[in-house]
Image: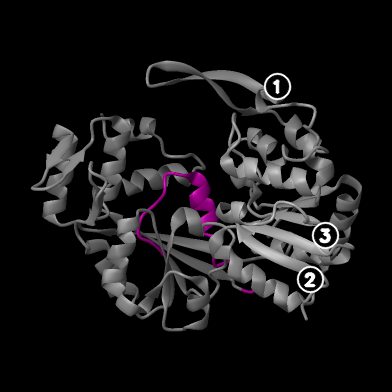
Amino acid sequence: MIEFRDYQSAIINEGMKILEDKRFVYLSMEVRTGKTLTSLGIIDRMIVNKALFITKKKAISSIEADYKLLSPGFELTVINYESLHKIEQSGWDVVVCDEAHSMGAYPKPSKRAKQVKSLVLKSNPYVIFLSGTPTPESFSQMYHQVYSLPYSPFSEYKNFYKFAVEHVIHKTKHIAGFVVKDYSGGKDIILEKMSPYMISYTQEEAGFTSIIKEEVIYVDPPESLIKICERLKKDLVVEGKEDVILADTGVKLMQKLHQLYSGTVKFESGNSMVVDNFKADFIFDNFCCSKIGIFYKFKEELNAIKAAYGDSICTDLETFNSDPSKSIALQIVSGREGISLKEAEFLVYYNIDFSATSYWQSRDRMTTKDRPENKVYWVFTKGGIEPQIYKSVTKKKDYTLRHFKKDFKL
């Protein structure tokens, strides 16, 4: 039987009152403070029979484990967002939307947001939103998270554009020679209107004292790889016997160099391959005796890791948590949220994502209340693109084409 921490019990009591009064509550609780378990505790206090928990695929097993430990009086179905079309759309008493900020695309709603809206309209359930970062890039991201609710504070606005008239500072930006509207300037009033529905809680408030120590390690790339990168920057194309690396736009050049400097590439044909295993071999040689979490960006990087680690690497949490001999490899975006890597001794990054959100969320996967220090290693290529990306995301700014052109004087 699970015993809730004092602050979780307090949030459960407050959350239940908000849910009964407003029909939805938003738990903005930082990672490792237990928002999943807290949400299950709220549902258990309600008089309900069936609950649906929507999350990321990699988080399903841990949520089901929490449910079994809690042993509540309601039936729970846990499903990932991509599989929503496979389940009954009605009959749910409560719906939980985990990592709710993933529905925050604008100005048009994402497929994910539309599916949740359809489900909510058919079931008219209580709704619980969960996120450690409700609006990671802009307050404008809040609208489509809650637009499925007929009782949200923005329900009078039929679409984002009408909402933006009052809630967004209107700007324009230049993209590929065109002037387009920029809706990223969401006003503070958005969170002010959401405040009656939100409960926020930080790691500091929960008593977390752990710190994250980062170390950047530079590795020498093979001369053959350097020649490919230099030729691509000069000619914007590298032709092989069967495939072509084409970088005829700034974005493609940035992406191809990002791949190549870590030893992989995706060709113009759509095929991809490991060009050189130097990074994966370096990680194995230096960390093979430790149980670690490895974050990679491109799919071929996983193949490089598997080639170096063999049977001592896995890609699922259940195996990683149960087998002390296994390390785990996770793609950055899919592994940055909703999972715990508390069994890992270190985190090692094979590569780095352009997104500041990916940086701040993924590096915190080992944090627990009882762990005083987390060690994170970044493996960068000398002369590569990764150090420039790192400088940007650590300042909470995404790495963009503008940064790339400035860094490489293009």
The image position of residue 82, as x and y in percent, is 55, 53
Q: Which mark is residue 162?
A: 1
Numbered-mark total: 3
C-alpha distance separating marks 3 and 2: 10 Å
On the question of residue 75 being in view, the answer is yes
Task: Give the numbered dot on residue 137.
Answer: none
Distance from Cα at disc 2 to Cα at disc 1: 42 Å
Q: Is residue 61 left or right of residue 319?
A: right
Position above or below: 233 against 394: above
| Circle number at residue 11 | 3
Q: Is residue 330 left or right of residue 303?
A: right
Residue in view at x 22 percent, y 63 percent? 277
Kind of residue indicated by mark 1: Lys
Q: Which residue is mark 2?
A: 5
Quarter-of-image position of residue 201: bottom right
Pick the front one: 113 or 199: 113
Give, as a three-letter code, the residue at label 3. Ile
Q: Is residue 110 above or below residue 73?
A: above
Q: Secondary structure at mark 2?
A: loop
Magenta span: helix, strand or loop, mainly? loop
Up-down: is 386 above or below 65?
Answer: above
In the picture, measured across the screen, residue 160 lies left or right of residue 296, that is: right
Q: Earlier in the sequence, mark 3 or mark 2?
A: 2
Secondary element type, mark 1: helix
For the rendered model, the colour scheme is one colour
Query: Which quarter of the figure has residue 109?
Result: top right
Magenta stretch?
348-370
